[in-house]
Image: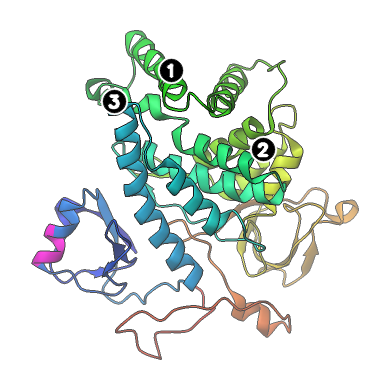
Amino acid sequence: MLFIKSSNLKIGMRLARPIYNKNGVLLYERNSKLTTQGIASIANFGLIGIYILEPAEPVPPMTKEDIEFERFQTMNVFAIQEELQTIIRTKRAPKMQVIAARIIQSYGRLEKKINFVQSLRSQEDYIVKHSLNVSILCALISHVLNIKLEEQLDVVIAGIVHDVGKLTIPKSVLEHTELTEQDKEIVRICEISGFDIMEEVFNTNLSIKRICLQCEKALRLYKQGEKNRNKLVTGAKILMVAETFDTLTAMQSEQDPSSEVSAIRTLLENPEVFDENVVDALIRSIHILSAGTCIELNTGEKGLVIATNSMNILRPVVLGFDSNNIIDLGNEWVYGDLEIKDIMKTMDNRYIMDTSALKRQGITVEEPEYVKAPGETEEEYIPGRDF
């Protein structure tokens, strides 16, 4: 799989991931070959590039949930972008309640974990995609914490608007590779202006500004190596975890993201900053180290997660590929020096799953419902294979 910039796309290249329009209508399915019209459409969508399959490469498996999550992201990125621009221009948020309610309906009532799949971000669309993902995480976490619906709505809206001030940063500043002190001052002024915008837009509900303001201050002190000594509302604690997790795991064209394992480790290692109950709610909301996940240990040995550890998500039971031994990382008396270094992933940052290896070991696992791509033959389509 290759990431190809839009300017370098060629007729006949095959898509590795589907493409939707802003209404969620499927335009190009996985395994579709690019045409002249398709390349023009991709450029018109403002995409900086797409994932392309190599000539002999089979289509990577995607579950129904993965496909729906990607479709949901595409639809709501456009909706949030339009709403945030309206907020900045008119100081009104006519569709905010509808957008937030849609996020809660889809991801704020689930009784199961989801695969939290990141989409690639550019400098131009980073804030909008970040805002969407943060709001989804806020919906997931707040549901696990069983907070009241009105509080859940507030924290989801806060997730959407918490970076609205950054959208007012001049383009000339964003184009700088390194920010000067003057640039940093401009950025700070724009960030502060965002809280004034929130107060004006949500003047009948000041809790949204309070959540965002407390989160921003606490994270700023954390980055400066200082402690926040003020008591935080629950919404701010949720937003802090969601904001940090998405920032760490975001896919950007300029740099590689941290894995979910690294991000969770960061959150767990700073309990004085990130509320332990909120971090636990995040862990209970998304798949981190599910059975079938391929991993690398700190010794360099590759392995396969064969059972999760409910007491410590980062220390599951692993089958080592080199030794062919079962390693229970939860038994720290025996394996205290071993830990998972990272997750093995595909180029588009999805888990490498190998459920077939688990089956060969006689271990029963929940089989994801993979969807065969159009044009893919039965020989090419092997659910649970390595990829």
Main SS, magenta region, reads helix
Mark 3: few, some, or many residues within 10 Å (few <14, many ≥20)? some
Considering depth in this image, is 293 or 173 the residue closer to the camera?
Answer: 173
Furthest residue to the front? 204
Q: Residue at x 58, y 61 (%)?
A: 114
| x, y percent for residue 325 | 76, 70
- The image quadrant where one finds the N terminus is bottom left
Q: Residue at x 40, y 90 (%)?
A: 379
Q: The residue under label 1 is which amino acid type?
A: Asp
Q: Which residue is mark 2?
A: 267
Q: Which residue is mark 3?
A: 174
Mark 1: few, some, or many residues within 10 Å (few <14, many ≥20)? few
| x, y percent for residue 78 | 31, 48
- Residue 196, numbered label: 1
Report how far apart the C-alphas of labels 2 and 1 lie in the structure: 30 Å
Furthest residue to the right? 333
Mark 2: few, some, or many residues within 10 Å (few <14, many ≥20)? many
Considering depth in this image, is 364 or 57 the residue closer to the camera?
Answer: 364
Report how far apart the C-alphas of labels 3 and 2 lie in the structure: 29 Å
Q: Are marks 2 and 1 in contact (CB under 8 Å)?
A: no
Q: The residue under label 2 is which amino acid type?
A: Leu
- Which one is earlier in the sequence, the residue at label 2 or at label 1? 1
Give the SS element for disc 1.
helix
Q: The residue under label 3 is which amino acid type?
A: Leu
Give the SS element for disc 3.
helix
Report how far apart the C-alphas of labels 3 and 1 lie in the structure: 22 Å
Q: Quadrant of residue 115?
A: bottom right
Give the magenta range: 36-40
- Give the color scheme: rainbow, by chain, secondary structure or one colour: rainbow
